[in-house]
Image: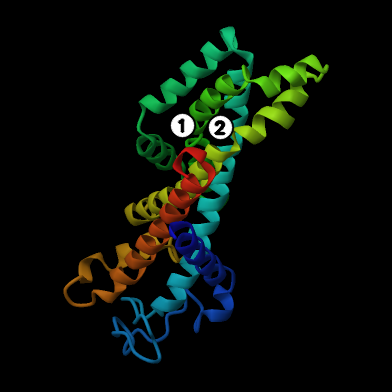
Amino acid sequence: MRIRLGLALVLALVALALFAPLLAPYPPAAQLDLETLRNVPPSVAHPFGTDPYSRDLLSRVLHGARLSLTIALLAVALAVTVGTAIGLASGWAGGLADTVLMRLVDAGLAVPKIFIVLVVLALWEKVTVVALIAILGGTGWFGVSRIVRAEVRAARDREYVAAARALGASARRVVLRHVLPNVAAPVIVIAAMGVGQVVLLEAGLAYLGVGVPQPTPSWGNIIADGQHLLLTAPWVATSAGLAVVVTVLAFSLLGDGLREHLDPRTR
């Protein structure tokens, strides 16, 4: 049930993001009329209302979905790729290589991720979307590598690995053809749940003003635009806030459902 609901929500969000230019009634940065259309409540012409700069909130939320999901998906893909590669190398090699790599991972896990990201972004004069993806992905692989390493260490002593070695398979073939597919399940679950976490982190960075700069629409800077209007124009902040909540919930449901489906112990 959860996997179906989560998958349906995720597919709906992805569809909205992909077709945002077609679904948005106005350009996301267009200031329609600063005299008469500032902080207009939701209506037929503006279903989500307008913000303090007379920009249509529905258009900004749709384009913000496109930006947030693109950043989150690519950052998680980068983190999972790097973490899986390092976890495979560490778990299979063992010895000194394993010790060195895991101490590096421990050092990365010891420092809060948000602190690392804020320091890097504070030192960066102008943050592009590509740079933001690289920063979020480059600081998110530590936990993945530790989980993959544990799975590899458990898998390398199993019968199918011993059989492949006895048949003369090379270490590379054993790792890629036999070990990696059998440790993919937890990686898939981590990736699904990680997307929602990165969406939340990216929105928080934009809210603080160190993420995607204005006027590019991001859920975080939309919330920031409405933070002083919660009593007079609450639709400004709540429109993007609800989008963040739904997205995080969707990927959490999908991750939980995948974990139940892929783990035989839960069936």
Q: Position of residue 200 (x, y in %)?
A: 38, 53
Quarter of the rendering containing residue 168: top right
Q: Residue at x 58, y 74 (%)?
A: 19
What amino acid is labelled 2 in the image?
A: Gly
Q: Residue at horizontal 43%, vertical 26%? A: 108
Q: For residue 143, which numbered disc appears in the image?
A: 1
**Relative to residue 159, is residue 25 depicted above or below?**
below
- Residue 161 left/right relative to 129: right
Q: Residue at x 48, y 35 (%)?
A: 139
| Residue 65 locus on image (x, y percent) | 48, 65
Q: Which residue is nearer to you in this view: 27 or 68? A: 68
For this orientation, the residue located farthest to the front is: 267
Quick check: 41 left or right of 140?
Answer: left
Per the image, the residue denoted by label 2 is: 83
Q: Amino acid at mark 1?
A: Gly
| Front one among 72 and 262 | 262
Q: Establish if 132 lies above or below 5.
A: above
Q: Quadrant of residue 111?
A: top left
- The secondary structure type at the circle numbered 2 is helix
Q: Residues within 10 Å of mark 1 (few under 14, many from 20)?
A: many
Q: Are marks 1 and 2 in contact (CB under 8 Å)?
A: yes
Separation of marks 1 and 2 at Cα, in angstroms: 8 Å
How many C-alpha atoms fall within 10 Å of the one at disc 2: few (<14), some, or many (≥20)? many
Residue 244 position, x and y percent, is 38, 61
